[in-house]
Image (cartoon, rainbow, N blue to C red):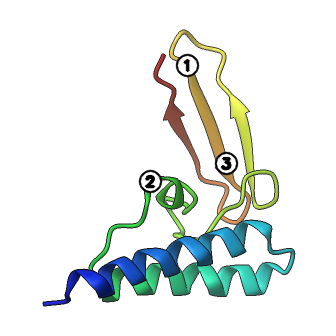
Amino acid sequence: MKNPQTKQLARERISILVANVLKENDEELAAKQARLAKKVAMRFRVRLPYEARQLFCKKCKAFIVPGRSARVRIGRSKTRAVRVTCLKCSHTYRRVLME
């Protein structure tokens, strides 16, 4: 069993990697860092933060950055939702907004 200090260190490392991915211009390096963040989370049995989990495509599991590798649209129906389309596999899914 991993001790709490290593899990905390893993969480910090994951947050640093996700922050680097979001500001990185090189797509290849960003994808590599995103895979590394997911690998660290699996290795130390730590859940990815909600914000980081939302940035992975549900179908192809690629890291998507809104505006660069994903299209983000606001739904027009009564259910307030944001539609996210992955530009790699063109899978569309909705995130329902709570009011």
Pointer 2 local density, CA inside 10 Å: few below 14, some 14–19, many at least 20:
few
Q: Is residue 77 left or right of residue 27?
A: left
Report the number of discs. 3
Pointer 3 local density, CA inside 10 Å: few below 14, some 14–19, many at least 20:
many
Residue 20 position by quadrant: bottom right
In the rendering, at what x and y percent does residue 30 appear? 72, 79
Q: Which residue is mark 2?
A: 50
Q: Say whether marks 1 and 2 touch (CB < 8 Å).
A: no
Using the image, tell me which numbered label, if any, was put on residue 41: none
Using the image, tell me which numbered label, if any, was put on residue 80: 1
Which three-letter amino acid code belongs to the residue tagged 2?
A: Tyr
Q: Is residue 92 above or below residue 46?
A: above
Q: Which residue is mark 3?
A: 85
Q: CA distance from mark 1 to mark 2?
A: 19 Å
Q: What residue is shown at x 67% (from left), y 48% (from top)?
A: 85
Q: Is residue 22 above or below residue 82?
A: below
Q: Is residue 96 above or below residue 57?
A: above
